[in-house]
Image: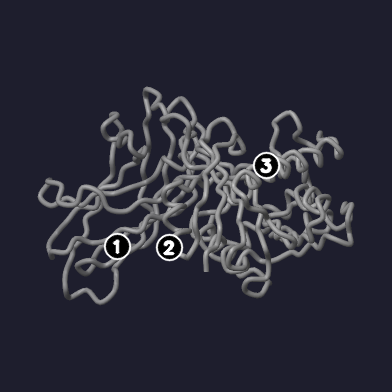
Amino acid sequence: MTDLPGLQATWDNLGKEDPYWAVLSDPERRHNQWDHDEFMATGRRHVEAVGGWLAGLDLELGGRVLDFGCGLGRLSNALAETGCQVVGVDIAPSMVEQAKAMSRFPERTEFIAYDGRALPFPDASFDGVLSLIVLQHIPPLPKVASLLELVRVVRPGGVLVLQLPSHRTSPLPVPEGCQAGLEVLAAPAQLRPGQQAEVRVRVSNLSEHPWHFSPNLQLGNHWLADGATVVSDDGRTPLPMSGVPAGQSAVVTLTVTAPAETGDYELELDLVLEQVAWFHGLGSATVRVPVEVSAQVAQPVAPPAAEEVGDEAPLVEPDPSGIEMFPLPAELFRDLLEHVGCRVVRLVADELGGPEWSSYTAVVQRLY
């Protein structure tokens, strides 16, 4: 989900319906089963752990700290208890309003709702940033934008402590009998060489088991000429993060790029479990669409779109929680932060991403 208003609506609704569980998603505490004092005590434990790491590195968050993704103020209150002036910011107005009402240190805490884009603070206006169990729920492009914003608002010499999942803890097994039904709803009939276009596809799970491989399960494509593959791997688009139950479907949009040479081609569509297998190799059928690639085409030419709602399979129901995980490999994180003038001092392994994810908390110092 890269739609920021949609992301904001998801978390605002969670803040209204089950705010404690939305922050700390213990399955046994869902449906408002968290005790308030026990919940807030977890914030003190996390802040104490972070303080211990920083002390061992001769670093500190400083006197004015930003709690990014503050939720109900769990970490903000714990930081304020140590004497910091804390500003908590969150994309969910419902969370921010509750954080204000719950604040134990109103003289040292301030809570602000924002839209997920530019942070409403001047450059270099904080000594430090703390963000745990937040960035992992932000999609890739907004995540990178958020990281750049966090660096911007920290003064040179200041410290950022940021938690993220890196990757899944184990490879995803492929159950036997993975079968997909692919129906092209709209596709270009003609393209210019190298031109991009969108293809809409209904993907149906014809297996006897649900697909819970996201974000690794994606719709992809190849390009064929005279039955031979000329482009073996082109576009990618993920299926819903909540998975696709057996007998249900999802409609997804894939961006494809036409081959560089003119001619008559077939656009072949298939599902791929990244770094594991294409479904065609598991015995599932692909679907092919003829496409003419010509230098004379002014715009992509598409046939009339098919009906997107049919009786073949019901569309997949969305995850009612809306909580999704978006990893960022540790080396990519390090490269990005160092590219914008920071020093990644240490990566500390943690369990904050949950049992399915390898997670780390990064201690970062802005150099200039």
Task: Determine which residue is flagged by label 2.
Answer: 339
Task: Residue 188: give its label.
Answer: 1
In-front residue for pair 44/210: 44
Quarter of the view holding residue 61: bottom right
Task: Estimate how packed mark 3 is, as few (under 14), some (14 to 19) or many (20 or more) residues with alpha carbons within 10 Å.
Answer: some
Judging from the image, what secondary structure is the residue with disc 1 in?
Answer: loop
Task: Determine which residue is flagged by label 3.
Answer: 52
Q: Is residue 218 left or right of residue 129?
A: left
Q: Locate residue 209, reporting x and y percent.
A: 47, 26
Judging from the image, what secondary structure is the residue with disc 2 in?
Answer: helix
Residue ranking furthest to the left:
226
Asked if the residues shown at circle 2 and circle 1 are in contact, with their CB atoms under 8 angstroms apart, the answer is no
Q: Amino acid at mark 3?
A: Gly
Residues at marks 1 and 3, CA–CA distance in whole angstroms: 58 Å
Q: Is 115 situated above or below 256?
A: below
Q: Locate residue 243, reporting x and y percent.
A: 51, 38
Residues at marks 2 and 3, CA–CA distance in whole angstroms: 27 Å
Asked if the residues shown at circle 1 and circle 3 are in contact, with their CB atoms under 8 angstroms apart, the answer is no
Residues at marks 2 and 1, CA–CA distance in whole angstroms: 39 Å
Q: Residue at x 49, y 60 (%)?
A: 141
> Looking at the figure, which quarter contains the N terminus?
bottom right
In-front residue for pair 218/287: 218
Q: Amino acid at mark 2?
A: His
Q: Earlier in the sequence, mark 1 or mark 3?
A: 3
